[in-house]
Amino acid sequence: MKTFRSAPMLASMATVLAVSLGVIGGATAPATVAAPVPSAAACAAKPTVVLVHGAWAGTSSWNGEVERLQRAGYTVRAFANPLRGLTSDAADLAAFLDTIDGPIVLAGHSYGGSVITNGAAGNANVKQLVYVDAAAPAVGENTGQLSGKTSALSAQPGTLYDQVPYAGAPAGDVELYLKQPVFLQSFGPDLPKPVATMLWAGQRPATMRAFTTPSKAAAWKTIPSWYVIGTADKIITPESQQAMAKRANAKVLEVPGGSHLTLISHPEPVTGQIVAAANQACQSR
């Protein structure tokens, strides 16, 4: 496992706010605040980059990376993760991947890491996996048990979630919404408060069984893997992520001060790690 450290983000609060508001509104950030695009390797056919969001987020959480990757010439798809349960979510992702021709670099954030770990299994087109503040379960492990001993999610459920019944739910299952204090203080504390508050308001819930269903596959055992770890992540602890990265023999990029929403607060290093994986995919063809 190789570990690299990114330089601290130098953007001002106003710049971070502008970028993050672009994420919320579904728009890209203005070119004047966009980060330099990482160099992409010469490749006859660049891989398609597929991005999978996690719980309490949506496809727009990847807007900063999508804009940068598109400017670098990549075809990018952000998969709308159903957040209904690991087995069915992974099956939906696998079906989505089957519609894409050619090599794929597959990235997952948070619970999305569990989904790519299962959804990529057996797909020869997936050449690289990128985990961003994410879970990378082994067979039999569930997402919830990988948060780490000191995770904010170790608190009593009643203090963490608003629990909402949903139509067709298996017995005992509910949708989980993060309570506002948890979202602001633990999920995205490195974002400006107005931005984090808007993201909290627009969060997509995940079902309880999304976190309790055992993983049926471990694609990282056969597919080269990369990791981005926010060193201040309070949801999936850096220690837990380092352990998962080590067993996957992943190439690790640490983002100093990055929260669980490093993909929003620090899109530059996250994009750089995805491009590094894409470059490797080109070289290995």
Image (tube, rainbow, N blue to C red):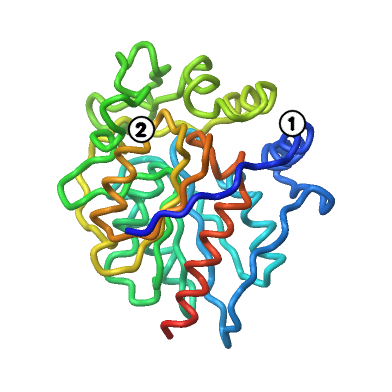
Q: Considering only vertical position in the picture, is 169 above or below 184? A: below
Q: In the figure, 60 relative to 173: above or below?
A: below
Which is more N-terminal, label 2 or label 1?
Answer: 1
Closer to viewer: mark 1 or mark 2: 1
Task: Report helix, strand or loop for mark 2.
Answer: strand
User: Does residue 107 appear to the left or right of 197 in the view shown?
Assistant: left
Q: Is residue 110 left or right of residue 32?
A: left
- Number of other residues with Cα within 10 Å of mark 1, as a class: few under 14, some 14 to 19, many 20 or more: few
Q: Where is residue 284 in the image (x, y as percent from the top left)?
A: 41, 82
Q: Residue 99 placed where, x, y %?
A: 47, 71
Give the labeled residue for mark 1: 13
Callout 2 amino acid? Thr
Pointer 1 and pointer 2: residues touching (CB < 8 Å)? Answer: no
- Circle 2 Cα neighbour tier, 10 Å, few/some/many (<14 / 14–19 / ≥20): many
Residue at image position (61%, 39%) is 265
Circle 2 residue: 207
Position of the C terminus, as image quadrant, is bottom left
Q: What element carries label 1?
A: helix
Residue drawn at (24%, 58%), measured in percent from left and top? 218
Q: Which mark is residue 172?
A: none
Question: For residue 16, which quarter of the picture?
Answer: top right
In the image, what residue occupies the spot 57% across and 59% down?
272
